Image (cartoon, rainbow, N blue to C red):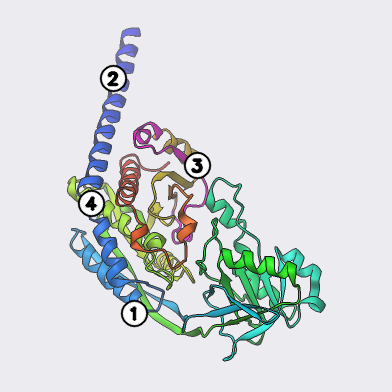
Amino acid sequence: MKKSLLLSLLFVNSVALFAQNKDEQFFKEIYNSALTKSQCYSWLDHLSNNVGSRLSGSEGAEKGVQYTKSQMEKLGFDKVYLQEVMVPHWVRGEKETAYIQDNKTKIKVPICALGGSIATPKNGVTAQVVEVHNFDELKALGEDKIKGKIVFYNRPMNNGVIDAFDAYSGAGDQRYNGAKEASKYGAVGTIVRSLNLRLDDFPHAGGQSYGDIPKEKYIPTAAISTNGAELLSKSLKSNPNLKFYFKQSCQQFEDVLSYNVVGEIRGTEHPENIMVVGGHLDSWDLADGSHDDGAGVVQSMEVMNIFKNLNYKPKNTLRVVLFMNEENGLRGGRKYQELSLANKENHIFALESDEGGFTPRGFSLECDDANLSKITKWKPLFEPYLIHSFEKGHAGSDIGPLTGKTIVKAGLKPDSQRYFDYHHAANDKFDAINKRELELGAGTMAALIYMIDQNGVE
């Protein structure tokens, strides 16, 4: 009996060791393919420099759809197709202008209209400025001190926070809801400090919402560069009665037809189970969106290229999904989920890359404790590639609506320290991308998908 038990244990251990060695070897092949046979950098070069900015509803967005579809058709998917989705069509118009008017001096400052904002009157808005750091300060001032003025939201991202995305979350409400809240007290406009950890002259765009207030209460809102915010705040301390002028000509048009781009390879053993990897194809209009989220788009496509190079046939169905309209509506992610429910599909895993093309550090996971425990046991396989962070947290906005009987969601977590230097700004261009970092991210995504495909979910 003891001999039989010993032999059984030896057999189990030998099987586990074989599986580990097999996985270690395949990881080496994945990363070698990512670093020596990758197409993602050249794809991004074209997407950034030939297609350009891809705000939903724009000509660039349509070109992005057609380009990525054509490239995915070359990758050997079982099928590549488009999912129709109606998206917002907001247009910035002519370049915005703004200046601080202190006595007879006019000092120009860089601003950009926030996505979804209305235009100023034709001749712009000129008014005194009230500086606040949060909505509590706004409420305390009340209508008597705000009516007829421009509200200046000047709460910086917290430099003391290690994860830059946590710092971003701590300051984002003033951008998204600032105009809505200030309108309640009779403000004529809002200026919001750009969500950026460094001081520079780039205003950062981003979405904002008027919520459910009536249209006649809408007021124009714009982001000001961090250097501009510092100057305005300093100037207000010297002269609380100074005035601020800004002019923007943005317009909101009727929704237009656009598409998610989907490539699918059918699973060899469990085709009914679907794994998704993706990023969002749209970008803000100030630049070509190389980090946000051109990087995630081409990394997701590269996962398929890696598997093709290694002749790996997934057990479960794999879909590469390039979502449209993450930036100002999330229509693509919601439409994908709507169609998934209608088709009674079962998603077991979804992986999103939407935090830039920087050096990968790990994954943010949305799952139950059993699956978290299972995935963290794979850390030794990833650690030789400096992937060490496996933590619960937000996986991604586009895969957020997705459901399944049992589903694990993951977000690629690159190093976050430089991301907000470029996020939503005019410097988010191809020259900000490091080829090797981009490729390492694609390899890391392929490695996790491989492990999920081999081992399933709990």
Residue at the (53%, 51%) spot, across then down: 164
What mark, if any, has residue 59 been given in the picture? 1
Other residues around mark 3 within 10 Å, as few (<14) / some (14–19) / many (≥20): some
Q: Does the magenta-highlighted stretch encompass residue 53?
A: no
Alpha carbon distance from label 4 to label 2: 39 Å
Question: Which segment is the magenta one?
Answer: 379-404
Give the residue at mark 2.
Answer: 11
Q: Where is residue 455 in the image (x, y as percent from the top left)?
A: 34, 39
- Quarter of the picture holding the C terminus: top left
Give the residue at mark 3.
Answer: 391
Dot 4 or dot 2: first in sequence order is: 2
State whether residue 296 appears in this view.
no
Q: Does the magenta-highlighted stretch encompass residue 395?
A: yes
Decide which of 321, 347 is in the foreground and name it: 321
What mark, if any, has residue 148 been given in the picture? none
**Nearest-to-viewer mark from 4 and 3:** 4
Give the structural element (helix, strand or loop) at label 1.
Answer: helix
Q: Which quarter of the figure has residue 63? A: bottom left
Give the residue at mark 4.
Answer: 38
The amino acid beneath tag 4 is Ser
